[in-house]
């Protein structure tokens, strides 16, 4: 399912227009991005928890050459589904 199909399904399920569903969806994604960038987590009871996690620097191998490379540290998004989900 892509974004357009998701918005159409939400609009149908909620009995609203696709335009209103798209506005709500876009607002939700913006608030989610801002919250996670701010270092907070989002817990949706019955669905799951979104949080940013620090991934430390590590060594890896270039699959073509076999040489060791250094993979830098970075932040990644982590999602943990709830037990009900």
Image: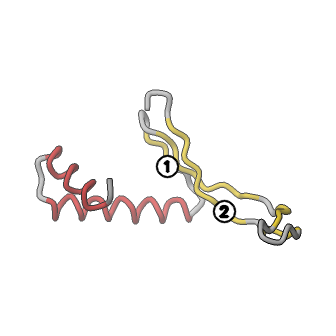
Q: Is residue 75 left or right of residue 38?
A: right
Between 61 and 37, the one nearer to me in the picture:
61
Colour pattern? secondary structure
Tag 1 near tag 2, CB within 8 Å: no
Residue 74's place in the image compared with 10, above or below, is below
Q: Is residue 23 left or right of residue 47?
A: left
Mark 2, residue position: 75
Residue 31's place in the image compared with 48, above or below, is below
The crowd level at tag 1 (other Cα within 10 Å; few <14, some 14-19, many 20+) is some
* Secondary element at image label 2: strand
* Secondary element at image label 1: strand
Position of the C terminus, as image quadrant, is: top left
Q: Nearer the viewer, mark 1 or mark 2?
A: 2
The crowd level at tag 2 (other Cα within 10 Å; few <14, some 14-19, many 20+) is few
Q: Residue at x 32, y 65 (%)?
A: 26
Q: Quadrant of residue 37?
A: bottom right
Judged from this view, the residue extending furthest toward the front is 64
Mark 1, residue position: 42
Q: Residue at x 70, y 65 (%)?
A: 74
Between 14 and 31, the one nearer to me in the picture:
14
Residue 84 locus on image (x, y percent): 44, 27
- CA gap, disc 1 and disc 2: 16 Å
Residue 1 locus on image (x, y percent): 32, 53
Q: Quadrant of residue 53?
A: bottom right
Q: Is residue 61 left or right of residue 5?
A: right
Judged from this view, the residue extending furthest toward the right is 68
Residue 18 locus on image (x, y percent): 15, 60
């Amino acid at each position: 399912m892509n974004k357009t199909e998701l918005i159409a399904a939400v609009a149908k399920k909620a009995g609203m227009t696709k335009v209103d569903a798209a506005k709500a969806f876009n607002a939700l994604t913006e608030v989610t991005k801002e919250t996670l960038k701010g270092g907070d987590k989002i817990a949706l009871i019955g669905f799951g928890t979104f949080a940013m996690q620090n991934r430390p620097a590590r060594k890896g191998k270039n699959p073509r050459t076999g040489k060791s490379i250094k993979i830098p540290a970075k932040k990644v998004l982590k999602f943990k589904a709830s037990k009900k989900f």
